[in-house]
Every structure is written in structure tokens, then in C-alpha cells.
Amino acid sequence: MAPTQSKFYLTTPIYYANSRPHVGSAYTTIVCDAIARYKRMRGYDVVYLTGTDEHGVNIERAAEKLGITPQELVDRNVPLFLELWKLLDIRYTHFVRTTSVEHAGSVQKLVRRTLRRAGKNGFIYKGRYEGRYCIHDNLYVSDSSEPADCPTCGRPAELISEENYFFRLSMFQEKLLQLYREKPEFVQPDFRRNEVVSFVESGLRDLSISRKAIKWGIPWPDDPEHVFYVWYDALTSYMTGIGFGEGEHGSAEYQKYWPADLHMIGKEIIRFHAVYWPAFLMAADLPLPKQVFAHGWLLFQQEKMSKSRGNVAYAEPIVRVLGNDALRYYLLRDVVFGQDGNFSHDALITRYNADLANGLGNLASRILAMIGQSFAGQVPSPEPREKLSGPDYEVKLLAQSQIGSVIEMYGTMEFAGALEGIWSVIGAVDKYLVETQPWKLAEDASQRERLSAILYTATEALRIVTALAHPVLPEATQKIWAQLGQSGKLANVRLDQLAWGQLRPGTKVQKAEAVFPRVEKTETVERIRAMEEQMNQPPAPPAPAAAATPAAPARIGIEDFTRVEMRVGEIKSAERVAGADKLLKVMVDIGEEVRQVVAGIATVYKPEDLVGRKVIVVVNLQPRKLRGVESNGMIVAASVGPEGTPVLAGFLEAVPVGARLK
Ligand code: ME8
């Protein structure tokens, strides 16, 4: 019988759907994607859940500001998450939305189960909530009766007293401390667990888990005046997504995959995951997740990157300019996982050029080119085993030892360390090639065997490095894998079965093709910034329902604009087009050539007045015929008044012919 595959269920936080995702939200999702890919390459059956948190005051308020309903707001924002995950090639298996019907059922089921078990000393009771509440912003400001101002509008919050459902968190203090003691891996890293332990040791107050003043939420079963407190709702989504709500005992999938093996989160939400969530589950007599791992923050301009602070960078421009792998590599290599780390476009590009373009990319193209030149594109034979010595042996030893240590570091989520290990092999092979100088040996027929051994060693090290880097660099490594003549998906390779010597001599390799072209820093940062600016523009207003008002033109990205090539041209000659009183045939010098353009300006401009005039020409339009005369471009003019009278665009200063407009 085949051994049953071990399962691994991991989750990201479910993100608030009140705005578009930024690099911070992408960070956790990318980390989890790398873990998921790594676990699959270790033979695990992986379930990976992400999703969106769509209830609560924040969403309600964001919608109000835009004059739309909360449902409309989340329906508008959720696709932005889905699109970004697609662009980033995130291989999640489940996406959960807290506004789904299944989720409401699942949350109500969890609370019913808890109420049923309760008996006299119920875990949930009705009590009075006393605190400060802002009636303008629908916001619970503080749990105490002390005067307080609303953090949003600054107006004094009112003292309110409303009946809520309370969760008896105070009863779980000892049980939670026992959990942290007996299962220290439950909260990671260790220093975070210590913070959680101190918090719990200092005493736990019961928690209000329903709200009356808020409408946007899941109704309490049999008491719909109340909606669930957003964290009770949100945390339960980790079970909803795999079918907890189905039937009496949950779906087959739920039974197979729950409890989660890993909840990956940012450090600011650790209390909810490491204190409240296990208590909610204990109260319902359900299995607890195996681990909550709280990572640090990405800082941007010295502060936590967040939409409310307005200091966000977006993933899309980076991916469009440098590719998906560049962002993944930078985030996992430059930030020590678990700690806070700075994000900067400068550092991103430095890493890209140094480690990807000059490192892995360059090594792959050099090796492939040499095999192409000296061995007609076929992997040459290695040195007989017993003769392997000196630098060849050192490269082999290093690559071999990194297989084990990189696997281990991925396993403990030391991504920077794992990548450093992989790149130490790349560095060693670079040095090995500099020292052994195979390109020189290639000129000497008597050195053929030595050349063959060196190239085998370098190629085999490259193959191992490529496989090891796959969880972090899925796209480029798959390309290099194919270039190395390896068939099939690298994702299906088992990392723990990787060993030196598996590369078969005679394997046909492909032509070298750069996977990471070098980029110029200043220009690249500028391109990324320009695209980001575009993304920060307020979204175009929704298309009006009635056709009477013309729709606002759709916003385009800078990349769309740069596709239009406009140059300064000088008119050399102009004449009327026979039988068309609006058209002129114009010969215009655009620098490299003189173009024939047909322009609809004859009603305003006399041909003889135009000669010598500088105009703006769109030079990359498809040629077309107007009244039988070919036109190879367009002269730009304002279109004025109801008749659309043309007024040629021009320059106030002297400008050379051929200059590009951007
Ligand atoms: O908290 N650095 O959603 P959220 C690193 N809906 N990670 C960051 C980050 C940054 N600057 N900014 C965001 C919520 N993150 C709740 C969660 S879970 C049941 C409910 C990541 O949209 C990080 O994982 O505010 C953080 O915990 C999460 O996004 C917060 O996302």
C-alpha cells in the first residue's frame, strides 16, 4: 500500500477588503506561497487558504465615504486581491469571503456549539457593555467609562451602555498558559510567545463578542438585533474555507485538514490568534491549530507600511518592471523573517542586479553557452568518481551539504539563511570557473577531458541550486530547469531526493537565454514610481447608468501612454488632396526619415504657411489610406468648438526634430 501523504494546512490572515492590497499584504501571501511550494516539494498534500475580511465598522465607514453600500464596496475591492494573487502566481487552494452564505452559517454553528456545551456556567452570557462610542463614526472608542475622544473625528465619544453577548475569556487563563507551556511551538517565534504569556498571566477580561450598534455583520442566531464582533467572525473563516459549516460534522475536507498546521500572521494581530482563537475553539471543544507564527512588519520610510499612514508601495509595478521572482526574492532575502525590515525600491534593484542578474542568471547563461560551444549542447561526462579532487570536490561537497541545510532552514522559516546558503554555492561555482578557466581549456584539444569534468561539475551544481531555489523563484527556476534539459515540472521534484550526480551526461541542453536582464537603477525606480503614482489616483467614477451623460474616460497606466510614440517633426512640404477639401498631404521630417502624413487641417491652414513649421507627430500608428492617399502617422492638434476646428500643437522654445515626447 502506498504510504498516505501527510497533509499541511496553512493560512494567511484574511485581509480587510476596504482598500486595494499593498506590498505589506502581499508579503504574508508571498511567504505562505513559498512555504506551500516548499511543502509540496517535500511531498505534503498542501491546502493553502487566503481570503478577505468584509464586515465591521471600517468597511461600513469606507463605503459611507464613497456613498455606496458595504456590499458594493467589498464586491469592488475583492477582485483587486484576486487579480494581484493571480499576477503574483500565488498557488492558494481556497479563498474565503466573510460575506459568503457559508461563512455566516459557519460562525453561527460555532457559537451554537459553544452555547450547547455551556450548561449553567456558560462560556457565553448576556451582559451589559459599558464604554465610549462615537455616534458619528459608529465606532466603539474605549471599553472604559472615562471620557474619550473619537480617534477618527475628534468629537467626544458618548458613554453608552448596551446589552451584548460576552465570551468568558477569564475562564481560559490557566488552560491557555498550559497550552503555551506544553506546546511551545504553538506561538512562534519564541520571543513573541513570551509576550503572549505575559499578557495572559496579567489576567484576562471577558470579551464582548456581539454588537448592537453595528448593522454590517453576521446576525446572532435567534437574536438578530446583534451582529458578531468582527474577530469572532474573521477567525472562524479559517474553518469555513474548508467546509466547517457543512453538515453536522463539517465536510470531508474539513475533517481531513482541520486543525490548521500554520496560521501565518503579522505581529499586530497575535493576541487575536494566540489568545482569543484557541479560547473560542476550546469553548467549542474543537481541535486547536498547531502553530501561530507572527512575522514582523515591512517598514517603508521608517514606519509600518499601511494604507492609513499613506506610506504604501504596490506590488504590481514591481512585478511588471522586474518580474514576480524579483519581488519574492527581495522580500525573503533582505528581511530577516520574523523581524521588522525596511522596504526600499533602491535595495530591491540592488539585490536584483547583484544576486539575480549577475548571480544566478549570469551563471546559468555562461554554463549553457559553454556547453553549447564545446559539447554541441550536450552535458559532458563527469570525472570518474575516484578521481574527483581539489576544487571539483569542494564544489560537490558544498552543493551536497547545502541540500540538507537549505531544506532544514526552509522548514524553520529561515528564508534569508536558506537563500544565503543557495547563493554560497552560486558564488563558489563562479569562483571555480574563474580559477579553472574552462574557456581557455576549450582552445586546447588535449584538455578535453578536464574541460568536460569542469563543465559537468558546474552544471550539476547549477541544477541543484535551481531546484533548491524553486519555492522562492518559481518562474525563473522553471525556465532554467528546462534550459538544462530537465523535463517536467520542477514543482514535482522532491527536494529530499535531490542528490549530486543525478544529472545524466548526454542530456541535451537548450540555448542560453537571459532570465534576469540587468537593469539601470535610477531609470527603473522612476518607472516603478510613475506606475505607482498612477495607482494612487482615485479610481475613475463608476460608469453612469444613463447613456445621456458621457462616461468619464477610463484611466490608463503610464505603460499605456508610453506605447504611443510621439516625436517632434518639421513640415517639409504640404499640398491639397484632390477631391477632399479638409485634407492636406504633408511631408514631415521626424529625424530618421521624412514621412507622408495626411492631416485634416486644410480648412484652417494654407499649405505654403506650413512649410518649416514644427509639429507633434504620432509615429507608431498603423499606416492607413485616406481618400486613396497613404498616411503614415498623425499630426497632433486640438479640436476646438462644436465643429472640431483643428489648432496645431507646437512648442514655444526651440526644439530639435526627432525629439521624443513623454
Ligand atoms: O488585520 N508588513 O487585516 P489587514 C508586514 N482582517 N505585513 C503586513 C504589513 C506590513 N507593513 N501590512 C499588512 C486584518 N501586513 C484582519 C485579519 S485574520 C482572521 C483577520 C499583513 O488587511 C500582515 O500579515 O489589516 C498583517 O497581519 C495583515 O497583513 C493585516 O491585514
Image (cartoon, rainbow, N blue to C red):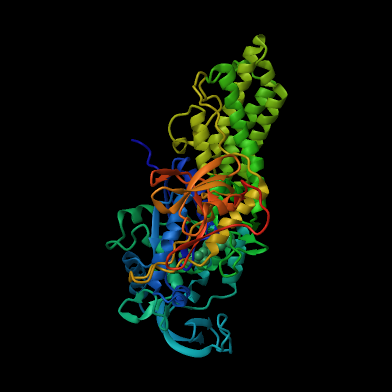
Q: Is residue 354 above or below residue 317?
A: above
Between residue 578 and residue 350, name the one nearer to us: 578
> Where is residue 573 shown, x and y percent of the image?
55, 46
Q: Which is nearer the eye, 448 or 5?
A: 448
In the rendered view, would you say 337 is above or below 372?
below
Q: Judge left or right: residue 122 versus residue 143.
A: left
The residue located at (48%, 40%) in the rendering is: 42
Residue 426 locus on image (x, y percent): 64, 34
Instruction: Give how far across and how far down residue 653 sits, in percent.
Output: 68, 57
Q: From where the camera sits, is residue 319 visible?
A: no
Q: Nearer the viewer, residue 13 or 27?
A: 27
The residue lying furthest to the left in this view is 247
The x, y position of residue 305, in whole percent, is 60, 63
Q: Residue at horizontal 59%, vertical 15%? A: 384
Q: Report whether residue 373 is seen.
A: yes
Which residue is at the front of the view, 620 or 614?
614
Location of residue 379 by image quarter: top right
Would residue 652 appear left or right of 116 to someone viewing this image?
Answer: right
On the rendered image, what quadrant is the N terminus found in? Answer: top left
Relative to 415, is 165 above or below?
below
Q: Residue drawn 54% across and 88% down? A: 157
